[in-house]
Amino acid sequence: MPRKLLSPALFLWPFLAMLAMVLLSLQALAQTDPTPQQTNDPEEQFQLGKKYEKGDGVAQDYDKALWWYRRAAEQRNPKAQNNIGVMYSTGRGVERSLEEATRWYRMAAEQGHATSQSNLGHAYLRGRGVEKDYVQAAHWLGKAAEQGHAKAQDTLGWMYKEGRGVAQDASKAMYWYRKAAEQEHEDAQQALGWMYYQ
């Protein structure tokens, strides 16, 4: 009995199906990995930077995160400016530079961004990237505290308790500790407890 030859079309269909799957995968990848032309909105650029920094839905890539943050920061997005500062402060994706971190925190802080104001205040408090200056620390922490930033409120409470950069004032210390404690800030809750105990 003669052998039946298999039709070449039988081999071609699986190849075409595989090619179609690859093309669809590439198309889906292009939609989840936007090109620079796909968005000029600073908030969207910030969100893309955050996704790349965290690896949220995309492969974690600090270079791409920084690239997107810089695009948003150029348009004065304070959250992007703050996150660039954090990257420089920690050395994630860039060479660590506390001076450069502080420069980015200041840009955002001057726009009223509470987290950046707190970061800048803490930089002055510890002398990280700037010369230690308790008065400047109190200034920036006060701005963040007024906006409800719990860490800034806690630190400002400590500054009033100790008289660092501000006149020592137990009632103001308790006020700021209480504000932070109401937001579940554990250090502030402990400090407030100690003040009541004494």
Image: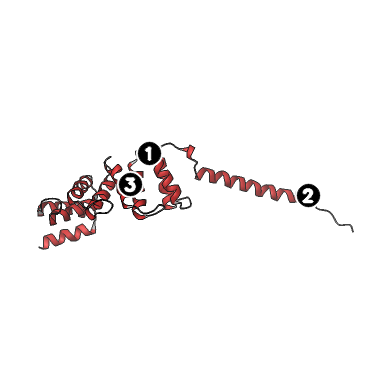
Is the residue under label 3 in contact with that under label 1 (CB below 8 Å)?
no
Colour scheme in the image?
A: secondary structure
Residue 150 seen in the figure? no
- Which quadrant of the view contains residue 109? top left
- Amino acid at the residue labelled 2: Pro
**Residue 42 position in % (x across, y down):** 39, 39
| Residue shown at the point (22%, 46%) measured from the top left | 140
Amino acid, disc 1 = Glu
| Residue 68 shows in the view | yes
State the quadrant of the C terminus. bottom left
Quarter placement of the N terminus = bottom right
Task: Tell me the distance, in whole angstroms, between the alpha carbons under discs 1 and 3.
Answer: 12 Å
Q: Position of residue 196 (x, y in %)?
A: 11, 60
- Image coordinates of residue 54 in percent, x first then y, are 41, 52
Reading the image, the residue beneath label 1 is: 74
As drawn, the residue found furthest toward the right would be: 1
Secondary element type, mark 2:
helix
The numbered disc on residue 8 is 2
From mark 2 to mark 1, how far is it between C-alphas?
57 Å
Q: Secondary structure at mark 1?
A: helix
Q: Tell me the tag on residue 82.
A: 3
Query: In the visual, does 62 lie left or right of 117?
Result: right
